[in-house]
Amino acid sequence: MGNQTVAVITPAFRAQDTIAATVRSVLSQTHADFEHHIISDDGVDYGKFLADNGLSDPRLRFHSSGKVGGGSTRARNMVLDLLDTPYAALLDADDRFKPRKLELAVAALEHQPVVATSLDVMRADFTSLRTVGQGPDRVLKASGHKWVSLSMDTMVVWDRRRADSRYDPDLPNMTDLDFLMGLYRTAATEMYLGTPLHDYVKISSSMSNASGFTERMIHSKTLLLARLESGFYPMADPAAAEGIAQFLRLSLEAEKLYPQVLAEKPGALFEDTIEPMIRAAGH
């Protein structure tokens, strides 16, 4: 392990159709000092599976959660408890890194404890739908993160010596934002890289607003908002709790509007609904 080693953490549940592309994106990184930790949460031997598909590398590390469908949050926590690398990054088993993701993140970690990046939102076949958060590189306060990164928060890379967190396995959705607020306990600011460096695949239930999906998102956002309002998340940026709470209030308004937007324009993304509302709010 070097002083710039990044542990990439990927839980895998029924991931045979996607994980080869995910792993290739890590093996193709211009920053070669990494460990890619793949956690089987379905009993599949992903080491053998990937080797059978021509993907074998000593930097690939394989684990088992010991469960079938135990959940990605528990799988991630298991590996986070084992790591001795200075840096860590998150990558879902159906997403990909752009080739320079780790290189640029590691360079930024020289100056900030957390790095977030713009994303390229894609279909399952990696057809690009839109970008989120594209713009100039800049330092953001924790209170301003969600107004720029208005979609997912799985794109973070962090210095575990200056900020660390664990997942809440009982939270049904929005677990990445909960995790990020854990990092903000000691990280008042982050470096935000405005070039899309992370391919984020939209799951079909999100794009089609499948039965119960909006309700689950509203439940989780309401729970996080109540936690913020009660002081559940102590954060180094004194304005962070209220900044994120304001975003969640607006996001809840967007959740109520989204089903009608989708009915009128099939295929519309939630980001397309909330982004104009963010601009109207002056962010």
Image (spheres, rainbow, N blue to C red):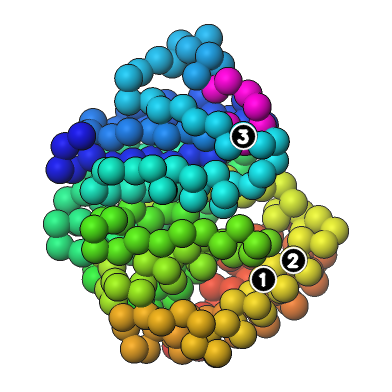
Residue 169 magenta-highlighted: no
Above or below residue 212? Residue 19 is above
Amino acid tagged 2: Arg
Closer to viewer: mark 1 or mark 3: 3
- In terms of secondary structure, where does tag 3 sit? loop
Report the residue that reaches farthest toward the right.
211
The picture places residue 221, in percent across and down from the top left corner, at 64, 75
Mark 2 to mark 1 CA distance (whole Å): 6 Å
Q: Which residue is mark 1?
A: 220
Residue 216: which disc? Answer: 2
State the CA–CA distance, disc 3 to disc 2: 27 Å
- Residue 11 screen position, x and y as percent: 54, 40
Task: List the residue tagged with mark 3.
Answer: 66
Q: Alpha-carbon neighbours of circle 2 within 10 Å: few (<14), some, or many (≥20)?
A: some
* Picture residue at 30% right of the left edge, 73% below the top: 186
Residue type for callout 3: Gly
Tell me, yes or no, if residue 197 can be seen here. Answer: no
Which region of the structure is painted magenta?
40-46
